[in-house]
Structure formats: structure tokens, C-alpha cells
Image: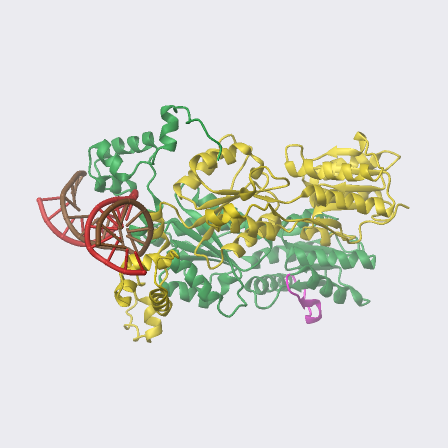
Chain colours: A green, B yellow, C brown, D red
Amino acid sequence: MPARTPPAPKTSVAVTTTTKAATINDIARLAGVSKKTVSRIINHSPLVRPDTRDKVEALMREVGYVPDPMARGLAFRKSFLIGMVYDNPTAQFIVNMQYGALDAIRNSGFELVVHPCDSRSPNYIDGVRRFVQQQKLHGVMLVPRVSEDQALADMLAEVGCRYTRIAAVALDEPARMVVTHDRDGAAEAADYLQTLGHRDIALIAGPGGYRSALERTAGFVEALAQRGIELPKSRIIEAGYTFESGVAAAEKLLAGKRRPTAIFCGNDEMAAGVYRVALRAGINIPRQLSVIGYDDSPLASRLWPPLTSVRRGTRDTGRIAAAMLLQDSAEAASALSLHSVHPHLVVRDSCQPPG
Amino acid sequence: MPARTPPAPKTSVAVTTTTKAATINDIARLAGVSKKTVSRIINHSPLVRPDTRDKVEALMREVGYVPDPMARGLAFRKSFLIGMVYDNPTAQFIVNMQYGALDAIRNSGFELVVHPCDSRSPNYIDGVRRFVQQQKLHGVMLVPRVSEDQALADMLAEVGCRYTRIAAVALDEPARMVVTHDRDGAAEAADYLQTLGHRDIALIAGPGGYRSALERTAGFVEALAQRGIELPKSRIIEAGYTFESGVAAAEKLLAGKRRPTAIFCGNDEMAAGVYRVALRAGINIPRQLSVIGYDDSPLASRLWPPLTSVRRGTRDTGRIAAAMLLQDSAEAASALSLHSVHPHLVVRDSCQPPG
DNA sequence: CTGAAAGCGCTTACAG
DNA sequence: CTGAAAGCGCTTACAG
């Protein structure tokens, strides 16, 4: 190891960063109060005289004191970690959800720990159980589609772990739900197509096991029905939310001689599959075929023509779901209103009136 | 609140999950040893008689005992959390990196906490410092491009936080680096284009502030030079790794009357920009223009024709970077070899010999 | 409104 | 190879 000269003496500011961090005992001693009083201030107890509070808080700022989350966690029997549990949706969706959660916990002393899992695995719930119990998580956000699994929610309730569920409809009590109203987003797509004059419309739906898929399908079909358009069974194809499944579905839809003039897809990936098939078959979008997606992913604006799609407000969703976990129960109980994020259609260039 | 009958008596298995978790004291008492001995077993100390170890380990398994990470962390003055620090690259890249890190820490008792940041913000390093110090992180993975910031690495060294840096070249000592050899990936793209017969080639480079961009540019230019092809300055355009900047660069490159017959792009997003411009200008890919990207993102196979691109092995990279943080220093010191992940070209349909 | 004692579940430092 | 004591930095439960 190379010989090194001792580091130059630091300024007082530098010392506070390299010297051992202050503890609650240091603050108590310097402020001339008991550590219990400092603890009360850390935990925002009202049982502290305002001038005592001010004095101690000023001192904490000056010293740069931050309570140790592990010591607090040990005493509380609960960590300062929020978990995000999800099962492999698209990358952009997950990243946006993470950004939203981080928006909510910024400067709160909480951190976000990620837990992807495979909900088709028979023991994935045990995996989540170990995760929340070993880390004594403060709470977890459940992202679709694991959010739709009642057995998962039941397990969390049983072990006493707080959670919020993000889903297309209210599957749980309001204090635990962020509802994304996928039905409304799909209905808006239907209204738009009807307004353009389309009558022969098709739907490439997501997999039946997904609540989001069911809601989007129902919202689309019902909105069309309200406007007097019947969607025959032959015009609805269930696919798998993947590009490849979208290709397969589009091939069926576009092979017959009477093609639909518009297709609504349960997500953008499948819409990209429609683009692929249309391009190969020489069908011009939007002149001969209108297409709408769902997600408003980056892909939507990379496609040509840019894809009209339903935006989900994913980051807001994540922010709300995380913020709900941070509320203390008193507040949460009083907030009886259902938390919602509403989708809306982003119109680009992939639709026009039928030729 | 609705009246509820008391819960039915549970089976013994259920009791172990709902009853208070066992502690080191329970294990010590049940095994008839001191808690210090149990502690030695938890920490894999060799100073335990094998039969004592076997007996206690069997008991821990039977009881389902797992040591409390917060209590251990408090005593160790170090948490069981790995941080991932990054600055807004593409979503798929981040998600793959996370998956890789999680591969490495699975069943290790460690968890992954994510910390996106904005490296253009003047005080982002302070933000990372607070993050690692407050949480007493066990270590952090630095993802490009924050991994390239020497001031960040210096800060981490100063506060005594372990880190690994993922970058195109070795910026630090081997024990702290995962090298992605972007130069080689770009060279492979150059070789491929030369082999196809291209001579008038252009390059849309990433931003000069990114080491990855510099390496890809250098690797591409040098490999062409070795094969006798000079790339004039006018054929190199610096762009911003974004779709829009790729569009702008392609417009310049494809506007003149003597167009290049092939374009290599520093990432897939910019390649998608080339596709957009070519489509609008009626230039057929690959017949009139060959295009290669870098990343092999999902977008590469959504484009038409599917984009030939350089795959990076991102998940492996993340796995190695996290695994290095878990090694104890003895092992790490002995592992003098440089950790590497090598890129390779994935050939699809976006290139052919010049017309 | 404030505080002294005991404890959260582990590890370190010291003895043997 | 094993253990009793003290301590990590907080909070709870109790008293005043």
C-alpha cells in the first residue's frame, strides 16, 4: 500500500461530515433536555413546549442531525422502507411507477425497495411474505397485475402489513386503493372512433386473466353500444398484451375480405403488432385503417404514423399509492374519498374517418 | 365496527407465522448455547464446533428463524441495503439493470433500494451522500452516466461507502469496475458494414459528455480505419441519445445529394429517428440505406424492418456489479481480474450491401 | 409538558 | 471453541 501523508486539517464544516454522526444523546446534551424530549420532537408529538421545540429543531439543523432509521426501526419494530411489488409489465410502466413513488417519499426519510416477482409461480406469495416480514416493511404498493390477486392482499392483511393496490376498479376499501378507471379510457377511445364515423370496428383485447383487460374491453364495448354500434364476437380477439400476440390477432382481423376500418388495442405493444401487419399487407394507416392503443408509451410516438393512445398517468398513480402508505392511520381514516387517476386519450395521427 | 367472532384456533404451522418471530435469544435458549455462539453461526465464523453449528442451524431452520436486519444493522453500523444510483437512461436499461442486481442479492438477506437522480443538478452529489449516509448503505452500484463522474466516486470513497462503477472503460480499480467494452461493440458494427461492402458510411454519435458515446465513436472510427475506410468529419454528427436528436441528425445526413449508404447510431432511439426520416423521404431501409443501432432494446424489433443492433448484456452487468458489493473484502482483494461484459451484434434486417 | 429506566435484537471487546 | 457484559441509537411504558 502506498505511503500517504496524513490528510490536511479540515474546516469545521468538513469535520461535521467526516466525524461520527451526532446521535439523539448529543442533541439532548447540547440542548439541555432529555433524549425523550428530542424523541418527541422527532416524532412530531404535540407534547412539547413550542420554544423547546424550536430550540431543539434549530440545533438539529445546525448539527445536521438525522435520526438513524435502523435504530428507530428496531425500536418501532418497523422499518422505514416502502416495497413495490410487481409482476413484469412493461419497463416504462415500472420505471414511471417508481418515479411516482419516489416523488412521494422524497425527504420523508423513507426509501423504496423493489420486488419484482412471478405471479404464475406457485409460491410467489410466500416470497412476498418473507420480503415484508424480514424487512419489517412499513408498507407495500401492489402494481397490476399482482394488485388484482386477493390471496396476496389477504396474506398482507394477515401478517399486518399495510398495502395499497393499484387497479382498474376498486377491489378493496378506499384507504387501500388507487383506481385507474381503465373503463373510462377505453370508452373515450370508442367515442372518438364513433365520432370519426367508424362503424365496423374491432378490438384486440388483453388476456382475460387481467382485470385491466376486462375493464378496457367492457368500457369499449359498452360505449360503442351506447352510441348504437354493436361489436360482434368475431370482431373481438383476445391476445396477450405482447407485440407477437398483437401481430397474430391483426393477421386474423385483416385477412378477411371485409376488414374493419378501425382497431382499438388493449395496449400499445399490440397496436405495434397491428402496424406491422398493416405495413406488410400494404394497408395504409390511417387512410385505410385507424388504430388506437393504450398506455401512451414512448413506442406510441416512435411508430409511423404516431399512434393515438390512452395515457394512464402512471407516475401520479405511483405517487398517490406511496403517499397513502405514509399517512398515519388517523389521517387515512378521515380521507374516505376514493383515490383516482383518470386516463385520457392522446390524439396523434393514427386515426381518420373511414375511407 | 362490526362485531366479530374470535378467530378459530390455528394449526401449529399458522401459529408460527402469526406469533411473534423468534429472536437470537430464543434460539440460544432452545439450543442450550449462548447468544454469542448463535451470532457466530449467523456470521459464518469458523470459531464454532461443527456439531454445535449443525445443531443450531437445524433449529434455526425448524423455527424459521431469520436474524433481524435492523438489529444487525444497528450493531454493525451498516445496513443490509444495496443502492442503485442512476440518471435517467432508457426505462428498459434501468429495469434490466435492476433485475440483474436482484439476481445477485436473491436469498442473501440484502435488498435493493433505487435512487434515480439528476446529474445536471448542482447538488446531486449531496443528495447521494445523504442517501448513503442516512441509510448506512452496504454499497451502491453506479450506472452510466453517473458512474462516469469522478467527483461522485471520490465522495463515496471519502465517506467510506463501497461502490461499483459500470462504464465503457476501466475508470477505477478492478475491484470497483464492471467494464462494458462499448468500443468493441461499435467495432463489430463497423466490421459488419465494411464486410457488406459499404464505403460511404456515417455516424450519429451520442453526446460528447458521455463516455459510452466517446467509446462507441472511437471504436467505430478506428475499426473502419483499420479496414481502410476514412470517416470524414462531415459524416459524423453528434446528437443527444434521443429520438428527436436522431431525427435532426438524420435530416442533415440524408438531405445532401450524395447520401451515405449506411448509418451507425450510438443507440436505438436515434436509429428510430433515422427510420422516421428515411420513411418520410421515401428512402428504403435496407435497400437504399443500412442502419445499425446500439442497445438492442425492444424498440429494435418493433421497427420495420427489424433493426440490427448491438446487445449489451445489461442484466449480467447489473448482476456482476451487485455481486461484487456482496463479496467480503478478502475475496474481493483476491479477485484481481477485471469484471467484463462483452457486447455483440444482433443481426436483423436493417442492413444489406449498398445498391 | 418532561424525564429516568428498561428494552428492541443484534454485535463488539474482552475474558477464559 | 464458548460466554457474560456493555453498547449500537432509538422508543415504549411508566411516573411525575
Above or below, comparing residue B322 to residue B119 in the picture: below
In the image, B94: left or right of B107? right
Please tell me which residue is depicted at 73% across the width and 49% down the height of the picture. B309
Coordinates of residue A161 in the picture (x, y in percent): 38, 59
Residue displayed at 38% across by 46% down: B78
Q: B63 above or below B314?
A: below
Q: Position of residue A349 (x, y in %)?
A: 72, 48
Q: Give me the residue at 38% from left, 63% from top.
A: A157
Residue under the point 79% across and 41% down: B263
Q: In front here: B94 or A89?
A: B94
In the figure, residue A50 lies in which quadrant? top left
Magenta span main SS? loop
| Residue A65 is one of the magenta-drawn residues | no
Q: Is residue A238 magenta?
A: yes
Residue B196 visible somewhere in the drawing = yes
Magenta residues span: A227-241
The spot of residue A270 in percent (x, y) is 68, 59
Which image quarter holds the C terminus of chain A? bottom right
The image position of residue A132, as x and y in percent, is 41, 58
Looking at this view, is A29 or A349 the one in front? A29
